[in-house]
Image: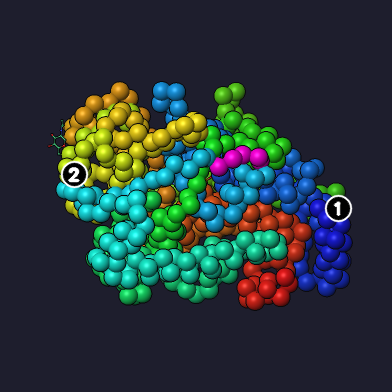
């Protein structure tokens, strides 16, 4: 912490005491730092929160991270033969600045780039196949969809421009008390509207054609979110940005970022499942009372509980994702918020593709498409089919053509049956299936997004997923909650929910 920040904080404290406008009773001795912080979940959200909490609260506070399963959460890999492959969150946008910052800070490299090639499958044949030549792709798309394609890039860019403001706000220490306020600070009312309508509605209103939506946009939302163009417009824009060039992944596997952040933050990982959180009121030295949170957890060595000053929940509070009971809170906090998570089955097949499954007459030895996207047609069993590369690219690696046995990743809404596998593959020697409750099932207009603040100093990181679910979104939410927790602890209202930040921050530059 810088001395300047300290004195500012002291000033603020004195100011508050003088005006006495606010009851500070619930804050345990304001000038103290918190002693113990808990983070529930060690995915990218929880581990990034740990990193930013350490940054905000300094070295003295003890940070415990609860994780019953593997560090990384929805970033995970499996071993096939001699290599590891991503099964969950796999690609990162070049403008995802927090993810970029993490690998720089941790001294991790980006995975070596292997050029990819995309095609679109309508259940019968390939309706589009990317050429090696940009100009050919461009002309084909222009021919078929007019300027829809160019306009889409401009539309996504305009959303992205506003999105990028969040980094500046966070740089200046600003935080937001709800997902809506965070979105509003980035993109004003237009972002709130975007979250509240379908991507289809948003794009039709912008003048895009229905054919373009069906042929090009739907395959992109299907591969990224397993859902149609009826997802919300904001996550839709995030999804379309995911079709940009320059996407990257972490050398050695994306989940390395999570373990790296934990190590760097000197947090203690408690391999246990949190079962209950309750609020306890305790008297303090100065005669007032303070709230603590009691966390009950179950691990291999049985059950136990501990007290914390601040708690960040970094796992979705939804059916099938976690089951934490909250007691002593008023108003009560539910174990599960409304809405559900969407099932995406990720099946990694080490095998030989049946190229004619894709209705193409190309020779398998010539077929080098890496990503087959699919249109939203009735009865289509798969969302996408990709030839994937290991998390670490060995020297001299070249992606083999479809005539060789290699690793294919299939995303589908249901587990693949043996029959389906037999249609798609001529032979295989391993099949590895992961069923993910992957991201929210988006159906705007939606009920209110879950809150960031569940109670005084109890925060909920994954509320942000209802705007959009992505590694970077969890990282943004993590930074926001670390700042929010800090500012609320020290009663620094001036850094919370400020209006007009966009013009303000420019002034401060
Ligand atoms: C198949 C798939 C593909 C994806 N593709 C991409 C992509 O290409 N790019 C991208 O940016 N995003 C992608 N995503 C989304 C991205 O992976 C997630 O948004 C992100 O990883 C969420 O991170 P998180 O830390 O918020 O949640 P999680 O990773 O879900 O972490 C939550 C953690 O909490 C733990 N936990 C649960 N209950 C408890 C409890 N009671 N006590 C303690 N711990 C508990 C869980 O074990 C888990 O480790 C994809 C997701 C999936 C599933
Ligand atoms: C390959 O796919 C085609 C088209 O779906 C199918 O008719 C054929 O039976 C498949 N080949 C094998 C060997 O399964
Ligand atoms: C979203 O839409 C619903 C229903 O149309 C409406 O009640 C709600 O106020 C809207 N929310 C926002 C943030 O616009």
Q: Is residue 306 left or right of residue 202?
A: right
Is 132 colored magenta in this rendering? no
Q: Residues within 10 Å of mark 2 (few under 14, many from 20)?
A: some
367 or 386, which is in the foreground? 367
146 or 329, which is in the foreground? 146
Image location of residue 211, percent across then percent down: 24, 65
Question: Residue, x 77% and y 59% (percent of image)?
Answer: 490
Q: Check disc 2 and report the residue beneath it.
A: 360
Question: Residue, x 40% and y 59% (percent of image)?
Answer: 240
Image location of residue 221, percent across then percent down: 35, 55
Q: Is residue 296 left or right of residue 487?
A: left
Q: Is residue 245 above or below residue 369?
A: below
Q: Earlier in the sequence, mark 1 or mark 2?
A: 1
Q: Main secondary structure of the magenta part?
A: loop
Q: Check disc 1 and report the residue beneath it.
A: 286
Q: Is residue 242 left or right of residue 473?
A: left
Q: Is residue 28 visible?
A: yes
Contact check, label 1 and label 2, Cβ < 8 Å: no
274 or 202, which is in the foreground? 202
Q: Is residue 335 above or below residue 494?
A: above
**Extent of the magenta region:** 106-110
């Amino acid at each position: 912490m810088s001395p300047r920040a300290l004195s500012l904080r002291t000033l603020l404290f004195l100011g508050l005491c003088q005006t006495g406008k606010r009851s500070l009773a619930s804050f345990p001795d304001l000038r103290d730092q918190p002693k113990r912080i808990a983070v529930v979940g060690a995915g990218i959200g929880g581990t990034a929160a740990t990193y930013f909490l350490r940054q905000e609260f300094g070295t003295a506070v003890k940070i415990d991270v609860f994780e019953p399963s593997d560090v990384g959460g929805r970033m995970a890999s499996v071993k096939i033969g001699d290599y590891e492959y991503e099964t969950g969150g796999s690609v990162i946008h070049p403008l995802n600045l927090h993810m970029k910052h993490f690998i720089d800070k941790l001294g991790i490299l980006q995975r070596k780039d292997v050029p990819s090639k995309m095609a679109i499958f309508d259940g019968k044949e390939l309706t589009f196949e990317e050429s090696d030549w940009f100009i050919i792709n461009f002309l084909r798309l222009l021919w078929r969809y007019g300027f829809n394609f160019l306009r889409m890039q401009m539309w996504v860019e305009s959303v992205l421009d506003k999105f990028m403001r969040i980094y500046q706000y966070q740089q200046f220490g600003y935080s937001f008390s709800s997902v809506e306020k965070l979105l509003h600070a980035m993109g004003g009312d237009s972002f709130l509207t975007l979250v509240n309508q379908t991507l289809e509605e948003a794009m039709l209103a912008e003048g895009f054609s229905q054919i373009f939506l069906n042929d090009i946009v739907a395959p992109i939302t299907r591969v990224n979110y397993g859902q149609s163009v009826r997802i919300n417009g904001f996550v839709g824009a995030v999804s379309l940005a995911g079709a940009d060039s320059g996407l990257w992944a972490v050398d050695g596997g994306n989940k390395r970022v999570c373990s790296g952040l934990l190590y760097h933050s000197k947090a203690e990982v408690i391999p246990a499942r949190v079962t209950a959180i309750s609020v306890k009121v305790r008297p303090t030295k100065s005669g007032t009372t303070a709230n603590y949170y009691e966390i009950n957890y179950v691990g291999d060595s049985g059950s136990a509980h501990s007290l914390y000053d601040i708690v960040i929940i970094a796992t979705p509070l939804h059916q099938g994702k976690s089951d934490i009971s909250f007691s002593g809170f008023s108003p009560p906090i539910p174990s599960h918020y409304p809405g559900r998570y969407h099932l995406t089955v990720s099946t990694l097949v080490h095998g030989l593709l049946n190229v004619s499954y894709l209705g193409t007459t190309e020779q398998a030895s010539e077929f080098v498409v890496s990503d087959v996207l699919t249109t939203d047609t009735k009865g289509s069993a798969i969302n996408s089919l990709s030839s994937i590369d290991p998390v670490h690219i060995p020297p001299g690696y070249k992606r083999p053509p479809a005539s060789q046995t290699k690793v294919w990743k299939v995303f589908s809404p249901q587990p693949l049956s043996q029959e389906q596998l037999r249609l798609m593959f001529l032979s295989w020697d391993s099949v590895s299936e992961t069923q993910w409750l992957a991201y929210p099932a988006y159906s705007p207009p939606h009920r209110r997004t879950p809150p960031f603040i569940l109670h005084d100093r109890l925060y909920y990181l994954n509320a942000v997923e209802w705007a959009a679910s992505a590694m970077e979104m969890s990282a943004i939410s993590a930074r926001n909650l670390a700042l929010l927790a800090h500012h609320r602890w020290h009663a620094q209202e001036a850094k919370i929910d400020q209006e007009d930040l966009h013009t303000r921050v420019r002034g401060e530059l």
